[in-house]
């Protein structure tokens, strides 16, 4: 099952509509379960959705003190490095959300390369697995994330799961180190498929014609090894939230 494809007219409307969708999904999750767990993505769409979120007055309707934020992957760089996904997320909107009640204690960053494990990336990956387990329901190793967002690369990678890599085959660990990423920087920490696929909803956020082939492959039956996005899905919903330029490779009729 590839999921549902929803095409928006532009990157701006994609970001705004996805932010609105995130707000209502989090409000619904909190109504049902009290707290909510959201996994952020890095990359340009990760920033775009946070920028759109903080520009939406409805964001105030969320009980931010009961929101846990996680990352699907992180670039293994020093704290506050401008290329860290967390740094970019703070710049794009997390700093403002703290004024709405979001607390540092529930912003679960992956360790930096000058953090508690130093440059030991394997230890840093394991540290994140422990943080996930600490917030998981009894008997689970990760929270059942309410929403897990994923940007998609032109090679159809998601998080830091890249085509042809050994990390794609991991089934018994929730996090992994990638030491040789084709997208810089080379060292990254990533969630694995079993962690990603524990999410209730997985949302792919994709803009741009350079991603059109990746979208077509991942939704059109390509193997996970060729198109890692094909291996990610939610237990309740899998949504491809894309703009028209990212949809140009889809068969006619799929984007109605
Ligand atoms: O660290 C990262 O870069 C990512 O988390 C990565 O998986 C990203 O989401 C995609 O490469 C899409 O990135 P863009 O939206 O910038 O194309």
Image (spheres, rainbow, N blue to C red):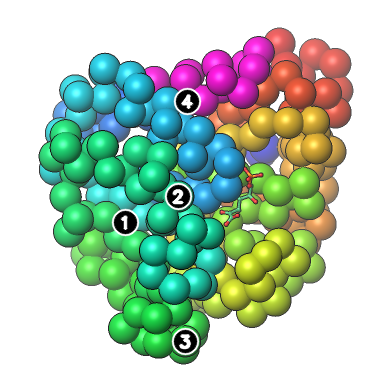
- Is the CB of mark 1 within 8 Å of ligand 1? no
Tell me if residue 194 can be seen: no
Q: Mark 4 and mark 3: span between their CA atoms?
A: 35 Å
- Residue corresponding to mark 3: 119
Residue 172, percent from left and from top: 50, 76
Could you tell me if the residues under marks 2 and 4 are in contact, i.e. CB atoms within 8 Å? no
- Residue corresponding to mark 4: 18
Residue 141, percent from left and from top: 34, 68
Looking at the image, which is closer to me, 231 or 50? 50
- Earlier in the chain: of badge 3 and badge 1, it is 3
Judged by depth in the image, the label closer to the viewer, 3 or 1, is: 3
SS for dot 3? loop
Determine which quarter of the picture holds residue 211. Answer: top right
Residue shown at 35%/38% (left/top)?
Answer: 93
Could you tell me if the residues under marks 4 and 3 are in contact, i.e. CB atoms within 8 Å? no
Q: Mark 4 and mark 1: span between their CA atoms?
A: 22 Å
Residue 147, percent from left and from top: 40, 40
Q: Mark 2 and mark 1: span between their CA atoms?
A: 24 Å
Judged by depth in the image, the label closer to the viewer, 4 or 1, is: 4
- Earlier in the chain: of badge 2 and badge 4, it is 4
The boundaries of the magenta stretch are 6-21
Would residue 101 be counted in the magenta stretch?
Answer: no
Q: Is residue 9 left or right of residue 112?
A: right
Judged by depth in the image, the label closer to the viewer, 2 or 4, is: 2
- Residue corresponding to mark 1: 143
- Earlier in the chain: of badge 3 and badge 2, it is 2
Could you tell me if the residues under marks 3 and 2 are in contact, i.e. CB atoms within 8 Å? no
Q: Is residue 221 left or right of residue 30?
A: right
- Residue corresponding to mark 2: 88
Would residue 10 be counted in the magenta stretch?
Answer: yes
Is the residue marked by circle 4 packed among few (<14), some (14-19), or many (20+) residues within 10 Å? many
Q: In which quarter of the image is the N terminus?
A: top right
């Amino acid at each position: 099952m590839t999921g549902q494809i929803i095409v928006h007219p532009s990157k701006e409307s994609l970001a705004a509509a996805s932010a609105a969708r995130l707000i209502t999904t989090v409000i619904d999750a909190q109504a049902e379960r009290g707290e909510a767990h959201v996994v952020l993505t890095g990359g340009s769409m990760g920033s775009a959705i946070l920028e759109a979120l903080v520009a939406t007055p409805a964001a105030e309707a969320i009980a931010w003190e009961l929101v846990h934020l996680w990352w699907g992957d992180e670039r293994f760089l020093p704290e506050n490095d401008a290329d860290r996904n967390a740094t970019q997320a703070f710049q794009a909107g997390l700093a403002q959300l703290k004024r709405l009640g979001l607390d540092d204690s529930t912003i679960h960053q992956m360790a930096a390369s000058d953090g508690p494990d130093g440059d030991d990336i394997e230890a840093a990956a394991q540290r994140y697995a422990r943080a996930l387990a600490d917030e998981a329901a009894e008997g689970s190793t990760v929270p059942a994330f309410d929403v897990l967002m994923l940007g998609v690369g032109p090679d159809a990678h998601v998080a830091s799961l890249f085509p042809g890599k050994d990390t794609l085959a991991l089934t018994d660990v929730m996090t992994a180190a990638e030491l040789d990423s084709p997208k810089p920087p080379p060292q990254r920490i990533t969630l694995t498929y079993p962690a990603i696929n524990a999410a209730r909803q997985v949302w792919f956020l994709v803009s741009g014609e350079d991603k059109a082939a990746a979208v077509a492959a991942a939704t059109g039956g390509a193997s996970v090894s060729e198109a890692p996005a094909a291996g990610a899905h939610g237990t309740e919903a899998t949504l491809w939230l894309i703009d028209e330029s990212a949809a140009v490779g889809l068969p006619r009729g799929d984007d109605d």
